[in-house]
């Protein structure tokens, strides 16, 4: 119930204005968001690399409604990728893009073209791009766009969400050679017709999808903070005789940072998903929706004058 309210608030312009105007403490945003600028993102990439942590950067923004804004998003990714290359960090950092931020909602073809340009700059920098997955109405279009992008950039990755009933089949279909698949539980409010509603069912689906991806020839990216699923993934990697560099773990910036370092120190590839930019509201509300106990942390921040 609380989760639904928070996720609804994530889409509310009024709530956004209210929260944006509140004396929200910098520490709240800082905990989950790297900063507003390219330079701040690069500084975080450097800090993570010093701990042997990989990164993927998400320039915040979604549901872009005009071409100008979509071009600006593409330009920021290009700027970041060039900066990472210039700083010698691109072997440790890639980018994550939302196709909706590149114009998917009003012109799929131009979203494809912008993603293609980003992928080409990433390839020049020696790194990769992964398309985030949004609500279920975009799943087919996102997979189709990624399959087209893979014709030129085989390492272009995408996300599958285990709360969707279709995802076990998608995992099997997309577990081919070089296919980079980020597996997550899913963060949107989805109807019962397409998505499991019980946490247990989402978790069981996650396990079936780990099996499908680990058994295949692709490159699984296990994006979860769930300690049981991390252990199951390690177990399945052993079962399928996979090298530690043939898959990776991924977690969000600011969530379970000690676990990031533990896994990296144990020799696993560990990538931190780092959002940056000034459009932090929708992202932050989804993180709160996942874990309503973060609400107390949030409420204290709103009340704080500092
Ligand atoms: P779950 O939420 O069940 O939590 C398991 C445990 O992790 C908790 O018991 C707690 O210990 C810890 N934990 C989890 N969240 C926490 C928090 N906020 N604060 C503190 N501890 C916490 N979704 C989507 O729909 N599309 C996408 O493209 C992506 N992309 C993406 C990339 C990456 C790298 C990650 C890690 C996640 C996403 N997600 C996403 C979000 C994902 O779908 C999911 O909502 C969150 O990862 C939370 O699910 P968990 O698997 O972590 O488990």
Image (cartoon, rainbow, N blue to C red):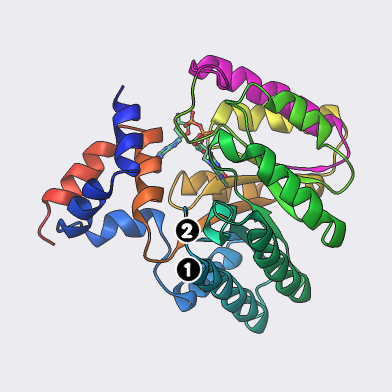
Q: Vertically, is 189 above or below 51? A: above
Q: Is residue 202 magenta?
A: yes
User: Measuring 81% from the left and 29% from the top, which residue is drawn there?
Assistant: 172
Question: In terms of image quadrants, where is residue 177?
Answer: top right
Task: Classify the position of the N terminus by image quarter.
Answer: top left
Q: Is mark 1 within 8 Å of ligand 1?
A: no
In the image, what residue occupies the spot 55% across and 55% down? 106
Q: Report the quarter where the C terminus lies.
A: bottom left
* Residue 280 percent coordinates (x, y): 37, 57
Q: Is residue 165 left or right of residue 150?
A: left
**Which region of the structure is painted magenta?**
192-220
On the image, numbered disc 2 is attached to which residue?
Answer: 64
Per the image, label 1 sits on a secondary structure element best described as helix
User: x, y percentage for residue 29?
Assistant: 32, 57
Please give the label number shown on residue 93.
none
Q: Residue at x 72, y 43 (%)?
A: 143
Q: Determine contact: label 2, label 1, CB under 8 Å.
A: yes
SS class of the residue under badge 2? loop
Disc 1 target residue: 69
């Amino acid at each position: 119930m609380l989760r639904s309210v928070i996720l609804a608030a994530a889409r509310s312009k009024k709530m956004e204005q209210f929260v944006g105007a509140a004396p929200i403490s910098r520490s709240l945003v800082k905990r989950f968001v790297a900063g507003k600028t390219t330079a701040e993102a690069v500084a975080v990439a450097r800090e993570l690399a010093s701990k042997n942590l990989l990164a993927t950067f998400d320039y915040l923004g979604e549901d872009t409604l005009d071409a100008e804004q979509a071009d600006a998003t593409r330009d920021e990714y290009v700027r970041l990728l060039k900066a990472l290359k210039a700083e010698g960090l691109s072997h440790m950092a890639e980018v994550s893009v939302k196709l909706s931020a590149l114009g998917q909602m009003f012109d799929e073809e131009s979203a494809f073209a912008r993603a293609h340009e980003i992928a080409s700059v990433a390839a020049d920098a020696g790194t990769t791009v992964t398309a985030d997955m949004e609500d279920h109405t975009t799943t087919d279009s996102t997979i189709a766009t990624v399959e087209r992008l893979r014709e030129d950039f085989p390492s272009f990755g995408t996300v599958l969400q285990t709360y969707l009933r279709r995802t076990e089949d998608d995992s099997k279909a997309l577990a081919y050679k070089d296919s980079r698949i980020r597996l997550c539980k899913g963060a949107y409010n989805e109807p019962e017709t397409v998505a499991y509603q019980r946490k247990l069912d989402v978790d069981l689906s996650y396990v079936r999808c780990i099996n499908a991806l680990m058994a295949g020839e692709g490159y699984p990216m296990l994006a979860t903070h769930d300690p049981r699923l991390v252990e199951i993934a390690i177990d399945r990697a052993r079962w399928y005789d996979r090298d530690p560099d043939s898959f990776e773990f991924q977690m969000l910036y600011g969530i379970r940072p000690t676990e990031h370092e533990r896994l990296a120190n144990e020799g696993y590839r560990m990538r931190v998903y780092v959002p940056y930019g000034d459009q932090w509201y929708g992202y932050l509300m989804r993180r709160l929706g996942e874990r309503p106990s973060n609400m107390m942390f949030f409420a204290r921040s709103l009340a704080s004058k500092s």
